[in-house]
Image (tube, rainbow, N blue to C red):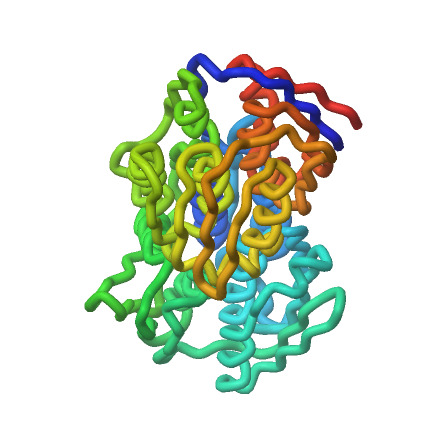
Amino acid sequence: MKVRIERSKAAGTVSAPPSKSMAHRDIIAAALADGTSKITNVAYSEDIKATIDCVRELGAEVTAAEDSVTVRGAFPFGEAGRERRFMCRESGSTLRFMMGIALGLGGRNSFYGSAKLMTRPLGIYEDICKANGIVFNRFDDRIETEGKLSSGVYKIPGDVSSQFITGLLFVLPLLKGDSVILLLPPVESRSYINLTVKALKDFGVDIIWQDDNTLFVKGDGAYVSRNIMVEGDYSNAAFLDAFNLLSGNVKVTGLDADSLQGDRVYEAYYEELSRGHATLDLSDCPDLAPVLMSLAAALHGARFTGTRRLKVKESDRGEAMDSELMKLGIKTDLYDNEIEVHSGTLQAPTEPIDGHNDHRIVMAMSLLLTLTGGEIEGAEAVAKSYPNYFEDIEKLGINVKKEC
C-alpha cells in the first residue's frame, strides 16, 4: 500500500493504542493457566494475531471479540510427545516467547514465520539446547526442536534480546525443581524483563530478583486465571506525542503514569531533543530509535548510543533510517554501536519513502512527511503493531491519502 501525506499539522486528543508488549504476555500467561481468563483492551495487530495462533497450538481455547479475548488455558498441556507447529508470522516476540515455552514442555516443535523472521538471531536457545541434549535444527523456512528442558541454572548474556529471558521465565515455573537465571552484565532491556515479571505475578507466579543480575524461579508452580485490562502502549504513543515537537497540539490519553514500560523514557528524551543536540542511550529502548531519529532530523540533530541491536529488528533500522532520511536531505553517520543524525534543512523527497517492511520506519517517516509532503511505499507494515495508525492521525488533522 502506498500512502501520500500532505503538509499538515496535528491537533486534538487521541487514545494510546493498547500495549503490544503486555498483550503478548497476558495472553500467553492466560494460556498457561488452568481456567478461563478475559483480557480486555486488546488491539489485533499482526503480532498479537500470531501469538493467539500459537497459544491455540499449545491447546488453549481463545475466543476473540472486538477488543478483548477470552482464553481457556491449556494446562495441563496434554501429551508431552505431541508435535506442535507454531505459526509466528513476522513476530520476533512470539517466536522467542513460544520457543522457550515449547522447549520446557518438550516433544517435537516446529516454528514457522516470514523469511526475515527465520533469520533473526536465536543463538541463546541453540546454546541452551546443545547443553541440554535437545535437538535444534534450523532450515530456510522453519526451526525444529525435539527434547525437553530441565530446571537448573541458566547463564544468559544481558546484552541480547530480553525475549529469550522472557521465554524461559514463562516456562521455568512449570518445571520440577527451582531454577536461576544469571544475567551476565551489562544488562540491556531490563524494563522488558520487568514487564514479564509483572505479567507473571498478575497470573499467580512470583519471580524474585535476588540481586540486579539474578532471577530466582520457584518450580512446580501453576498459573492462575484472571481478568485483566491491557494498559496503553508508550512505544506507539511516542509517535503520536512526537507531533507536539513538530508544531502540533496533541493530547495522548490512556497511558499509565506508573507503567514499567521502558519506552516511557521517550518523554524525557523528547525534552532533551527539543533543547538542542542531545546524546541519548537506546540500549534499553531500541524500538524508539526510528521516531527519535526522525525528531532529531527535524530539530537539532542527535547522537544515539547503544544502537547495535537495531541491525536485527524487522529491518536494519539504522541503515533504513539512513537511506530514507537522505531522501529528505538529512545526513547520518552509522557506527557499530552508535548513530549520529546531523541537523539540516528538511527537503521534500523526490521519490517515495521505502517502508522497509518495518512498522516503526513507516510511522517515523510519516511524521517528517507532515512537514514536507511525500509518499511512503509499503505503508501496510503498520499493521504489525498499530493497524489504525493512519486513521488515528487523520482524526488529528493529518492529510492522508491511501492507494492500494
Q: Could you say where residue 360 lies in the image, as x and y percent from the top left?
A: 56, 41
Which residue is nearer to you in this view: 170 or 303? 303
Observer able to see residue 321: yes
Q: Could you say where residue 392 lies in the image, as x and y percent from the top left?
A: 55, 21
Q: Within the image, what quadrant is residue 369 found in?
A: top right
Quadrant assignment for the N terminus = top right
Observer able to see residue 46: no
Horizontal side of residue 125 vs 238, given as left or right: right
Q: Residue at x 46, y 27 (%)?
A: 240
Q: Residue at x 28, y 58 (%)?
A: 206
Q: Is residue 166 above or below residue 70?
A: below
Q: Residue at x 37, y 54 (%)?
A: 284
Q: Is residue 8 above or below residue 100?
A: above
Q: Is residue 112 above or below residue 26?
A: below
User: From this viewpoint, which residue is outermost toward the right?
Assistant: 404
Q: Could you say where residue 389 lies in the image, as x and y percent from the top left?
A: 57, 28
Q: Could you say where residue 266 lies in the image, as x and y percent from the top left?
A: 36, 39
Horizontal side of residue 113 vs 54, given as left or right: right
Which residue is nearer to you in this view: 386 or 38? 386
User: From this viewpoint, which residue is outermost toward the front?
Assistant: 344
Q: Residue at x 24, y 62 (%)?
A: 208
